[in-house]
Amino acid sequence: MRVFRRAPRWLRRLIIHSFTPSFTVGAVIALLRSDGKLLLVEQRHSPGWALPGGLLSRGENPRDGVVREVAEEVGLTLIADELPIPYAVLAPEARRVDVVFVSREGDRVGGARIADELEVTGVGWFALDALPDVSEPTVDILRGVRLL
């Protein structure tokens, strides 16, 4: 420990990071309309439908990240300060943490559309009891926030 304490800060961080698990952190939104339908996107880079959102940049606030991702993917403008308190859904085996905003304001935000054709291939509203083929992480998230 004496040697470790004397090591430069960058080296101490490298040593710690090489022996501790690292997780990816994402922010997504479960946006529901008054008819109970959930907004999902079909993404080019992964099989199955998913919640709008994505990975956070280093140091990015989850509220800002989900606002950015939703605008990029489905062209909706969310207001960060109006988002509800999020849930954290942990998937330790996948080394993933998702910050999940559950909002019932789907009627208020307008029409979702494909905003980035390079990333998103489909957008749709689906009843929770009639979901399309959703990705495994999406199932984990929906279970984690008790929507499934």
Image: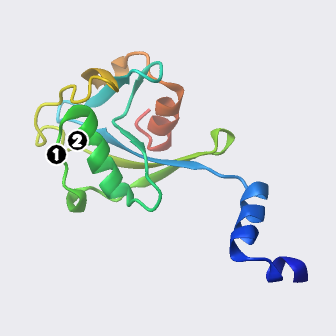
Three-letter code for the amino acid on which mark 2 is drawn: Ala
Name the image quarter holding the N terminus. bottom right
Q: In this view of the protein, which residue sits in the foreground, 136 or 71? A: 71
Instruction: Report the disc number at residue 71.
Output: 2
- Quadrant of the rendered image containing residue 116: top left
Pinpoint residue 80: horizontal percent, then vertical percent.
24, 58
Can residue 1 be seen here? The reply is no
- Quadrant of the rendered image containing residue 85: bottom left
58 is higher (above) or lower (below) than 3: above
Pinpoint residue 26: horizontal percent, then vertical percent.
46, 46
Earlier sequence position, callout 2 versus callout 1: 2
Q: In this view of the protein, which residue sits in the foreground, 62 or 10? A: 10
Q: Residues within 10 Å of mark 1 (few under 14, many from 20)?
A: some
Indicate how the structure is coloured in the image: rainbow
Mark 2 touches mark 1? (CB < 8 Å): yes
Determine which residue is flagged by label 1: 77
Residue at the outermost right position: 2
